[in-house]
Amino acid sequence: MAGKRVLVTGGAGFLGSHLCERLLQQGDFVLCVDNFFTGTRRNILHLLDDKRFELMRHDVTFPLYVEVDEIYNLACPASPIHYQFDPVQTTKTSVIGAINMLGLAKRVKAKILQASTSEVYGDPTVHPQPEEYWGNVNPFGIRACYDEGKRCAETLFFDYRRQHNLPIKIVRIFNTYGPRMHPNDGRVVSNFIVQALKGENITVYGDGSQTRSFCYRDDLVEAFLRAMATPREVTGPINIGNPKEFTIRQLAELVIELTASKSKIVEAPLPADDPKQRQPDIQKAKKLLAWTPTTELREGLVKTIAYFEDLLSQEGVNLH
Ligand code: NAD
Ligand code: UDP
Ligand code: UDP
């Protein structure tokens, strides 16, 4: 059904802004709600002239009374630097934000999708991670505000389902990258590209043998749309990510190659609780969403590098 009224919380962020764009392209009306903690107007400037797009500055930890048909709940800082800046606010955003959005969904009878995370698996002891794995999370470490906040949000989604029969969808996102990532948010892909383009040292934390699996943002947004369109009985959680696993050192080498940079790889201390390996088992996404990622890391990195080259060349650009 085109022409739905769709709320995207965190809509001015990296993934949210792409989702807003795709929803507008398919004919929906989009209400983008964001408190601009990590999101920026720059990400959605090009959408502001569209009559079907509306922007509201709002913090999801406060109630929100609007009329919509679908809700994508993405509001939450995603990078360790940002979610650890004010950890109490991070937990509030995930937990109170989820309660408010679920309360809203209940009142207006909207379908609601939660952007959960591979971090619910913590530092996994099962590899690759299927949705049935309950995870290995440190409940009081420096990543807990994010990991436990997201786990509690999943609990709330399922309890609203059980208590109020809400149509819910939960997707667990694995590391995703692409244009419009925040240049200063400390995530590995943006860090390495910016460092390479500036000719600075590439900071590999630890010995770089830890692994991640990187999904290009277009693949991910496609999975969001497919998850929302599933029948009522499909709740998830469903892993979404690219199962091709790379070591962080391999990523650094690839970025140096693709930018033809003279940067050198240096080792820096490994942050606490940094997961050693991460790779999604995407059997469920394949079966339930008929989805599989199609963008190779090399191809996605070329596009992301072009974005950062352009951003860095804009003199005096306000990077926030
Ligand atoms: P992002 O930081 O670019 O986007 C998050 C957005 O939420 C920002 O625009 C921010 O300003 C907004 N926000 C934060 N707190 C808010 C609040 N209290 N009220 C309203 N808005 C608020 O990050 P992203 O990568 O686009 O992530 C989007 C979602 O996907 C997040 O929920 C994140 O946890 C999840 N996710 C992302 C990844 C990834 O690799 N990018 C991986 C796993 C999960
Ligand atoms: N809420 C909201 N928008 C709405 C409806 C509810 O933000 O349109 C918030 C409301 O502030 C409440 C929360 O969602 O605290 C949970 O709502 P619910 O109806 O589930 O619970 P209750 O109101 O009984 O606490
Ligand atoms: N990382 C790194 N150098 C950086 C930034 C991150 O080596 O400049 C490592 C980090 O320690 C982790 C991996 O890259 O092992 C992915 O980090 P990111 O913060 O992007 O995501 P997450 O840890 O949440 O998967």
Image: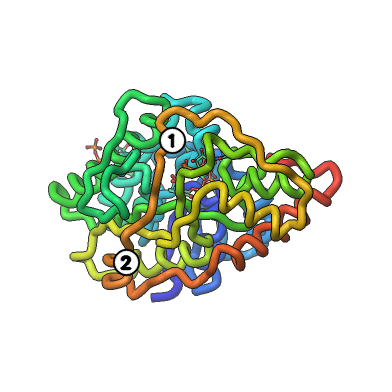
Looking at the rendered structure, which numbered label has been put on residue 161? none
Q: Which residue is mark 2?
A: 285
Say if 264 sits above or below 304 in the image. above
Q: What percent of the width, then of the height, locates residue 70?
A: 37, 60
Element carrying mark 1: loop
Element carrying mark 2: helix
Q: Going 32% across and 34% down the picture, which residue do you hit?
A: 148
Q: Which of 271/152 is in front?
A: 271
Q: Nearer the viewer, mark 1 or mark 2?
A: 1
Mark 1 CB within 8 Å of ligand 3: yes
Where's the N terminus, which quadrant? bottom left
Quadrant in the picture for residue 138: top left
- Identified by mark 2, the residue type is Ala
Question: Alpha-carbon neighbours of circle 1 within 10 Å: few (<14), some, or many (≥20)?
Answer: some
Q: Going 46% across and 41% down the picture, which residue do you hit?
A: 76
Direction from residue 47 to residue 211 in the image, left or right: left
Q: Which residue is mark 1?
A: 274
- Label 1 vs 2, first from the N-terminus: 1
Say if 93 sits above or below 305 in the image. above
Q: What percent of the width, then of the height, locates residue 46?
A: 68, 60
Residue 67 in sight here: no
Q: Which of 201/15 is in front?
A: 201
Q: Which of 176/276 is in front?
A: 276
Label 1, label 2: how far apart the Cα atoms are: 26 Å
Where's the C terminus, which quadrant? top right
